[in-house]
Image (cartoon, helix red, strand yellow):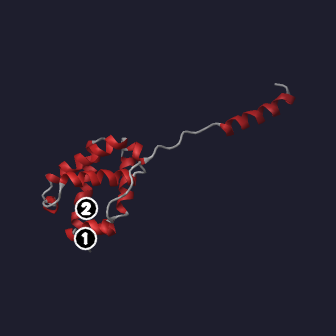
C-alpha cells in the first residue's frame, strides 16, 4: 500500500471506530422480564412463602393481593422500571411485624428459589438482591 495513503486511511478507520455506537446495557427491569417478569417472580415467591413454615405465620393477617401489588411495585422501582415508589417507608411497613434476622433470611431464600424457578440468570439475581439488601436495616427489627 502506498505510504501516502496509509496514514489517512488509518486516521479514517480510527475516527469511524470512535463513532461506532454501543448498545446501552439493559436495565435490571428489562433483565427481569419487564412488568410481566416481575409479576411472575413475585407470584412465584409468594407461592413459595405460603408453603414456608418458617415465615408463613408472618403473613397470616396480611392482605396478600395488596402485598402482591406492593411487592411488584417495589421490585419494579428498585429495578429502574417505570413504577414510582409510593409505598410507606420500609420501616413503617414492617415495624409491627417483629421481623427477625432468620425471618428475613428465609424470605431471601424463597426469593432466590423463585428466581431460580423463573430461570433468572445468577448475575441478574445478584443485582436485584444487592438492591433489596439495602433495605435490610429498615425491615429487620433488631
> Badge 1: how crowded within 10 Å, few (<14), some, or many (20+)?
few
Occupied quadrant, residue 70: bottom left
Q: Position of residue 29 (x, y in %)?
A: 40, 46
Q: Residue at x 61, y 38 (%)?
A: 21
Q: Which residue is labeled 1 in the image?
A: 95
Q: How many marks?
A: 2
Does 28 appear above or below 2?
A: below
Q: Position of residue 65 (x, y in %)?
A: 20, 51
Occupied quadrant, residue 93: bottom left
- Residue 126 shows up from this direction: no
Looking at the image, which residue sits at the far top?
1
Q: Which residue is labeled 2 in the image?
A: 105
Nearer the observer, 45 or 69: 69
Measure the C-alpha gap from mark 2 to mark 1. Answer: 17 Å
Looking at the image, which residue sits at the far bottom?
142
Q: Earlier in the sequence, mark 2 or mark 1?
A: 1
Tag 1, which secondary structure?
helix
> Badge 2: how crowded within 10 Å, few (<14), some, or many (20+)?
few
- Residue 132 shows up from this direction: yes
Labelled pair 2, 1 in contact (Cβ < 8 Å): no
Q: Residue at x 31, y 64 (%)?
A: 88
Tag 2, which secondary structure?
helix
Q: Residue at x 45, y 46 (%)?
A: 27
Q: Quadrant of the C terminus?
A: bottom left
Nearer the observer, 69 or 6: 69
Q: Position of residue 111 (x, y in %)?
A: 27, 52
Q: Is residue 13 left or right of residue 30?
A: right
Q: Quadrant of the N terminus?
A: top right
Q: Residue at x 27, y 69 (%)?
A: 140
The mark lying in front, picked from 2 and 1, is 1
Looking at the image, which residue sits at the far front?
86
Q: Position of residue 14 (x, y in %)?
A: 72, 37
Amino acid at each position: 500500500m502506498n505510504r501516502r495513503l496509509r496514514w489517512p486511511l488509518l486516521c479514517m478507520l480510527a475516527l469511524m471506530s470512535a463513532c461506532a455506537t454501543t448498545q446501552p446495557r439493559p436495565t435490571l427491569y428489562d433483565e427481569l422480564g419487564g412488568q410481566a417478569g416481575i409479576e411472575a417472580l413475585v407470584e412465584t415467591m409468594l407461592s413459595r412463602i405460603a408453603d414456608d413454615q418458617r415465615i408463613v405465620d408472618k403473613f397470616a393477617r396480611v392482605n396478600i393481593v395488596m402485598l402482591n401489588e406492593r411487592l411488584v411495585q417495589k421490585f419494579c422501582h428498585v429495578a429502574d422500571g417505570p413504577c414510582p415508589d409510593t409505598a410507606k417507608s420500609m420501616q413503617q411497613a414492617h415495624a409491627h411485624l417483629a421481623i427477625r434476622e432468620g425471618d428475613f433470611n428465609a424470605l431471601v431464600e424463597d426469593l432466590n428459589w423463585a428466581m431460580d424457578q423463573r430461570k433468572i440468570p445468577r448475575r441478574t439475581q445478584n443485582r436485584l438482591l444487592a438492591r433489596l439488601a439495602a433495605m435490610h436495616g429498615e425491615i429487620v427489627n433488631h
